[in-house]
Amino acid sequence: MVCAQKFSASCENTTNAHLTHSGIFLVTPSYSLIPAQNRQRLSVAPMMDWTDRHCRYLHRLLSGQSLLYTEMVTTGALLHGDVQRHLRFNAEEHAVALQLGGSEPADLAHCARLGQEWGYDEINLNCGCPSPRVQRGAFGACLMNEATLVADGVKAMCDVVSIPVTVKHRIGIDKIESYDFVRDFVGTVAQAGCSTFIVHARNAWLQGLSPKENREIPPLRYELVYQLKKDFPLLTIAINGGITTNAQVAEHLQHVDGVMVGREAYYNPWLMQSWDADFFGAPVSTLTRELVEEAMVVYMERAFAEDGCPWYAIARHMLGLHHGQRGGRMWRQVWSNHKLKPLPAREVWQIARAALDKGAAHA
Ligand SMILES: Cc1cc2nc3c(=O)[nH]c(=O)nc-3n(C[C@H](O)[C@H](O)[C@H](O)COP(=O)(O)O)c2cc1C
């Protein structure tokens, strides 16, 4: 039995309390009551194939107050596909933003409305993805060339939802280095009703780089994002790209309203454990990795009972939990061992615990 952990009640508007599992008690602020500029203070980036509902469940255990994003869901997938599969999420995940990929204003409006009906706290439009598939669909990063179309899409969404509509984008595309490009993009889209921009601080090169290379090779230019905040002081500007430590988060928060962390939160989720205390004024958390792991096992059992979801579809997201720790490699090997798939999660957990102890003893 996990002992009760009371998460922060730092914010006066803390109204959503729920007993999540095994006695871990999460208290998260009601999103609609948080001032807009604080909602984006810290978030975990949308990451395709990674930030599914299971991953977000893990991240929410670690930080009650940061904002979590879905993977990008295309308007086509929602218009022609299985809406429940794409939009269902756990109540504990709030605050959670639905990221849409698309460009047709009427389609975006339809999908934004769906997102609101399903209970999402924010709709975000992807204007930063450079993948060839997305380019063929004429959305993602190439939309930065079409600020007016993005503005039309934002307006169409704002007209039909009451939750915030936000945009995630790059600082430029291809070899466009000038600050004016991103400034004009933000200015045009802001006029349509978007007041929050999450800026991946590197260009997207639409030719010749894979999506992975496009997250690594174009240089980071944080100063352009800081300049956006200076030029648009009333907008909420969050920065993203290459941020891997909480010291870096704190430094960026001197210049902008928010920080979005992607890969580091996935590979090293324990980074998030101090976020509520460090960045939201919450009491220092007494959470341990062991508590998180146990809570995840309870969640795996629940997901299996609900719809037969196998534990390894969930465990894959927590393989970084013991990142950098003695015994962590052996622990990870257990949770990713295909031969253990037929066992129930609870048994795998016991094997993993033993492996961690053994690995730590031999390290
Ligand atoms: C596996 C993976 C999938 C991604 N999928 C998306 C996506 O669906 N939508 C999006 O806007 N960005 C996506 N991104 C980009 C991230 O949101 C983020 O902008 C990028 O990783 C830079 O942040 P970081 O350096 O903190 O990881 C993805 C990144 C990764 C690593």
Image (tube, helix red, strand yellow):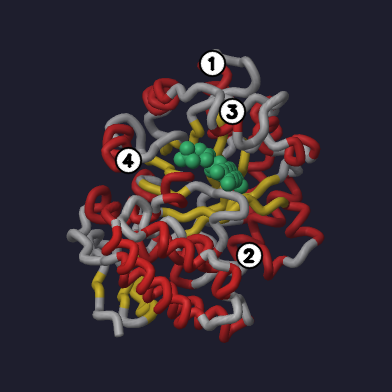
Q: Amino acid at mark 2?
A: Leu
> Which mark is first along the chain, 4 or 1?
1
The verdict on label 1 being within 8 Å of ligand 1 is: no
Residue 87 badge: 2
Query: What is the residue that sits farthest to the front in this orientation?
Result: 362
Q: Secondary structure at mark 3?
A: helix
Q: Are marks 1 and 4 in contact (CB under 8 Å)?
A: no
Q: Which residue is mark 4?
A: 245
Distance Cα–Cα, label 1 vs label 4: 30 Å
> Which mark is first along the chain, 1 or 2?
2
Q: Which residue is mark 3?
A: 188
Q: Is residue 331 above or below residue 162?
A: below
Please give the name of the residue rendered at 60% of the width and 80% of the height, measured from the top-left corner.
Answer: 342
Front of the two marks 1 and 4: 4
Residue 356 badge: none
Q: Amino acid at mark 3?
A: Thr
